[in-house]
Amino acid sequence: MNAEIIFNYFTTLTDVQKQQFMALEALYQDWNQKINVVSRKDIDELYLRHVLHSLGIAKIQQFNEGAEILDVGTGGGFPGIPLAILFPKTQFTLVDAIGKKIKVVQEVIDGLALENIKAYHTRVEDLPGQFDFIVSRAVAAMPTFVHWTKGKIKKDSSHERKNGILYLKGGDLTEELKEYRNAQIFDLPEHFEEDFFDTKKVVYLPQKFKI
């Protein structure tokens, strides 16, 4: 499966964006042999399981020019790198506590010549600044994630949707989200037809997490 799956769902990409998406596979194949950041099984389905999955957030929320987005526990650069390609005028900050992962992320950023990303080897609690949205792919249960990111979201919103967390999750979230009455769940099968997305969701938590 190649980058065409991305182009099928995102039909207004520029030539530069298409080239960047197409370049992802070789960059990850190369770096994954040196530092394993994507499982062997998943590297063969990079565009489905990592790139398109990351872009599920874009089906729920478009990011404005100049907006600041934080990707917590980015791992190999997901969802931050695909989103940064899609929104070249939005600023992305990617953090991970594991140094070797951030090394790969930085190499991919450099390989794509992306100028709207900064990557840091740090815990999110130690990162200064505030952001419009925080994005992530299931790095922890929601209560833990909310605790980690406390104080990191700007109070003033520049988007129609209030600032908050956009979290890629899967499975039954009833128990995990029971204390967040204003959480919204968006099912990705409404946007993507592949079986991989059958249980995949985007969870949105607005800035005021509890009612």
Image: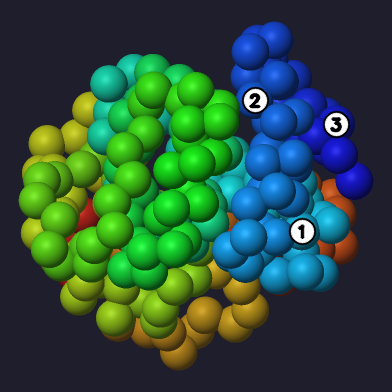
In the picture of the structure, the residue carrying the numbered disc 3 is: 4
**Hey, what amino acid is under mark 3?**
Glu
> Residue 23's image quarter?
top right
Give me the disc on residue 43: 1
Q: Pick whichever of labels 2 and 3 is earlier in the sequence.
A: 3
Q: Residues at badges 2 and 3 in contact (C-beta under 8 Å)?
A: no
Q: Quadrant of the C terminus?
A: bottom left
* Residue 132 image offset from top left, x and y in percent: 24, 40
> Which of the two discs, 3 and 1, sits closer to the camera?
1
**Hey, what amino acid is under mark 2?**
Gln
Measuring 26% from the left and 34% from the top, which residue is drawn there?
68
> Residue 42's image quarter?
bottom right
Applied colour scheme: rainbow
Does residue 130 sit above or below 125 in this rendering?
above
| Between 206 and 113, the one nearer to me in the picture | 113
Q: Residues at badges 1 and 2 in contact (C-beta under 8 Å)?
A: no
Q: Residues within 10 Å of mark 1 (few under 14, many from 20)?
A: some
Measuring 15% from the left and 67% from the top, which residue is drawn there?
125
In the picture of the structure, the residue carrying the numbered disc 2 is: 20
